[in-house]
Amino acid sequence: MASLNDIRSTFLDYFARQGHAVVDSSPLVPRNDPTLMFTNSGMVQFKNVFTGLEHRDYNRATTSQKCVRAGGKHNDLDNVGYTARHHTFFEMLGNFSFGDYFKSDAIPFAWELLTRDFDIPKDRLLVTVYHTDDEAAEIWKKVAGLSDERIIRIPTDDNFWRMGPTGPCGPCTEIFFDHGPSIWGGPPGSAEEDGDRFIEIWNLVFMQNEQHEDGSMTELPRQSIDTGMGLERIGALLQGKHDNYDTDLMRALIEASAHATTSDPDGPGKMHHRVIADHLRATSFLIADGVMPSNDGRGYVLRRIMRRAMRHAHMLGAQDPLMHRLVPALVHQMGGHYVELREAQALITETLRAEETRFRQTLDRGLKLLDAELEGLSEGATLPGDAAFKLYDTFGFPLDLTQDALRERGRAVDVAGFDAAMAEQKARARASWSGSGEATDAAIWFDLAERAGVTEFLGYDMETAEGQV
Ligand code: ATP
Ligand code: MG
Ligand code: MG
Ligand code: MG
């Protein structure tokens, strides 16, 4: 059975043979884009190459890109543990053409790799195209011999990609694998699309247009290709599994979690192990790329992911910090390809240990408070915002951690009430500061944050986080 490590190599080797430069993954903190919280697709490191601002000595490239989707427009955090196909951290395999080849090569490359090198049966595959993209539909028909029902025309933005409000854009085609009728879900475009039967494995973007500020759209002089395929998704199907978390790599992490907590990987705690395995990867790779847990910006997203995993460890009955004990399993699985993980192993271990030690001091008491609050509520009622705020402010529970805990019990939080409690505390903090009238530099900011707790910083982060791509 091919491992995820083998599959990554097969992909990169295939495109290397087709004249692509094999380029390293860029870091999870984008170097060239301060507006983007984390690298969330393969094209991020090539943005300026696509727009022509930057030139490289190759016009075809292939990568396996580290991606995190846990904030901003692409946020899959809430999907983790619930769907078979989403992670917060995943690897996106991609091939890119910078004004070189276009649709009539990109489609045959993808088809050949999937059906010849990976030997996927043709009748398990289907594709979507943007509803006006006759050219792509024709190429699919010719190259793959797919019947019209297996080339689904989609009129929504799911099949029209944009770099931003202006700039390069174009139709895309998505390749789906049918995991079979034993699994719930319908084909793309149908009402049951959200199930796990038809899984999107690969997205090919045809950058052929440019969107201008005045609303008009023109043809790009240099047409380009940007593709992305989730390694864990292609891995699952090649390993005959229906779930990303059953692939060799994810399974090794799940088993490490089960071993460390002396519990059954497939028992009642199954979901906790999945969340822990996923969040272990996201946190470790973020730390390796220089993000540290903190109360604002990227560091706060990291802290949210870490604490969420730590609550799940607690639910498994772990009496001591767990996450740091799983780092060797992760390094064993992924340190071969990602040197930075190996190099940062000590830092990752210590950061996880310190954060979990600290959080465990309040976690227990916070969970007890949460239980007590819930007891006083009628069946299905939402948790009042001020209770969620108290959990946040006193016990260090990020809002989404409380939401995650409630979701298991079919309840929600009054988010507006939480925001109001937060705003009130911010106002109080401001009022208490305005009298001092001394320093005028950054010291004020830090001093204020100190006195007000973390909320002032969080408020700042919330505003910028909305603006993510
Ligand atoms: P979905 O519709 O399943 O959420 P997407 O359309 O958001 O996927 P793209 O932005 O097209 O995904 O990313 C390209 C590829 O990356 C997808 O086809 C998929 O294989 C993979 N991918 C995207 N999001 C995730 C994720 N959260 N976890 C694992 N793989 C992912
Ligand atoms: Mg998505
Ligand atoms: Mg999609
Ligand atoms: Mg897609």
Image: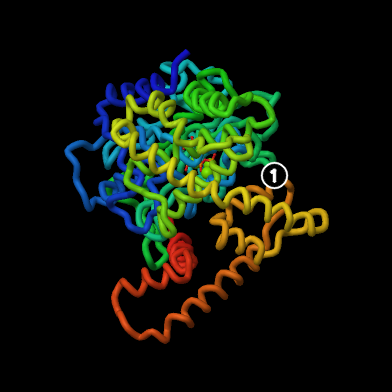
Residue 112 located left or right of residue 148: left
The spot of residue 134 in percent (x, y) is 48, 40
Q: Is residue 8 visible?
A: yes
Residue 175 located left or right of residue 418: left
User: In this orientation, which residue lies closer to the viewer: 335 or 260?
Assistant: 260
Q: Which residue is mark 1?
A: 408
**Mark 1 element type:** loop
Q: Which kind of residue does numbered mark 1 sit on?
A: Glu
Q: Residue at x 33, y 36 (%)?
A: 346
Q: How is the image coloured?
A: rainbow
Give the residue furthest to the top: 1
User: In this orientation, which residue lies closer to the viewer: 14 or 274?
Assistant: 274
Against 272, residue 28 (above or below) is below
Q: Is residue 146 visible?
A: no
Q: Residue at x 49, y 41 (%)?
A: 88
The spot of residue 163 in percent (x, y) is 39, 52
Against 430, residue 31 (above or below) is above
Q: Quadrant of residue 60?
A: top left
Count of marks, rendered view: 1
Give the residue furthest to the left: 57
Q: Quadrant of residue 274?
A: top right
The spot of residue 61 in percent (x, y) is 28, 34
User: In this orientation, which residue lies closer to the viewer: 432 or 250?
Assistant: 432
Q: Residue at x 43, y 63 (%)?
A: 464
Mark 1 nearby-residue class (10 Å; few <14, some 14–19, many ≥20): few
Q: Quadrant of the C terminus?
A: bottom left
The spot of residue 51 in percent (x, y) is 28, 51
Against 233, residue 97 (above or below) is below
